[in-house]
Amino acid sequence: RCRRARPGLGLIAVAVAGHGLGDPAAPVFGANDEALLRGAAAFETLRVYGGRPFLVDRHLARLRHSAAVLALEPPDGVEQLVAAVLGAAPAEHVLRLYRTSDTVLATAAPLPPGIDAQRSHGIALQSFELGAPPQLLGGAKTTSYGLSIAARREAERLGADDALLVGDGVVLEAATSNVWWRRGDELFTPEAGAGVLPGVTRAFLSELEPVTVGRFPLDDLLGADEAFT
């Protein structure tokens, strides 16, 4: 299960452009930052293994793309912030990068609890039909996750672990992760585009295994031999 880390975990380290490392409990965003006012910020989440951020160059490239789509300034200096956070955090953690209207920052957080248990027993998904997804964000990863998080909360209320988002009957993604499934020896995942973020891990896996990419109805996923996020 390759999953974008869930929010709400205490921070281990924070580095802010122009300030360097700071108190992880101290405020960072100004009250007029578009990140707070409208969720208009670009961000990335990636796993750090043994002090090494996984596929960091690809995440940085997508961060720059997302900032451009949102008409934000480029995330200049983010590499130095990454280095500062890595030096202040344990070898295993979650690294997050942000470009808001006012600043660039990097944070380190502990790994979400319960990952090993989830991997051992699996997860249940509750599907939600959203209609046709908007086309405007074009592969940008932004902090505007309100709909996805609301779907996850409702899925949890109904006894599931996460939400599966469906647009006009076509499988999109989970609340914060791409979706995959296998029939026989063939691997499938929805094509990136409206409603489907071009995940970095998704692209990496596609380089390791042959993958059939397209627009698939929900029944295709329900008939799979195996599915994962």
Image (cartoon, rainbow, N blue to C red):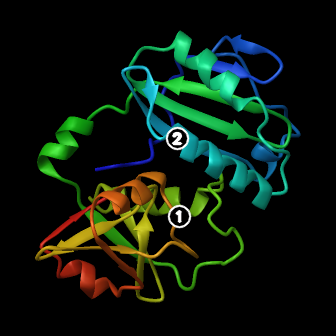
Could you classify mark 2 by the number of other residues whose Cα lies within 10 Å: few (under 14), some (14-19), or many (20 or more)? many
Vertical placement of residue 101 versus 225, above or below? above
- 36 lies left or right of 2: right
SS type, badge 1: loop
Name which residue lies at 64% across and 20% down: 14
Exactly how many numbered labels are in the figure?
2
Q: Nearer the viewer, residue 70 or 26?
A: 70
Q: What is the x, y in percent for residue 10?
A: 50, 23
Name which residue lies at 55% across and 47% down: 58
Q: Nearer the viewer, residue 98 or 153?
A: 98
- 98 lies left or right of 121: right
Q: Name the residue type under label 1.
A: Leu
Vertical placement of residue 139 versus 117, above or below? below
SS type, badge 2: strand
Residue that numbered label 1 is attached to? 197
- 86 lies left or right of 173: right
Q: What is the x, y in percent for residue 125?
A: 29, 64
Name which residue lies at 49% across and 14% down: 89
Name which quarter of the figure residue 118 lies in: top left
Q: Which mark is residue 45?
A: 2
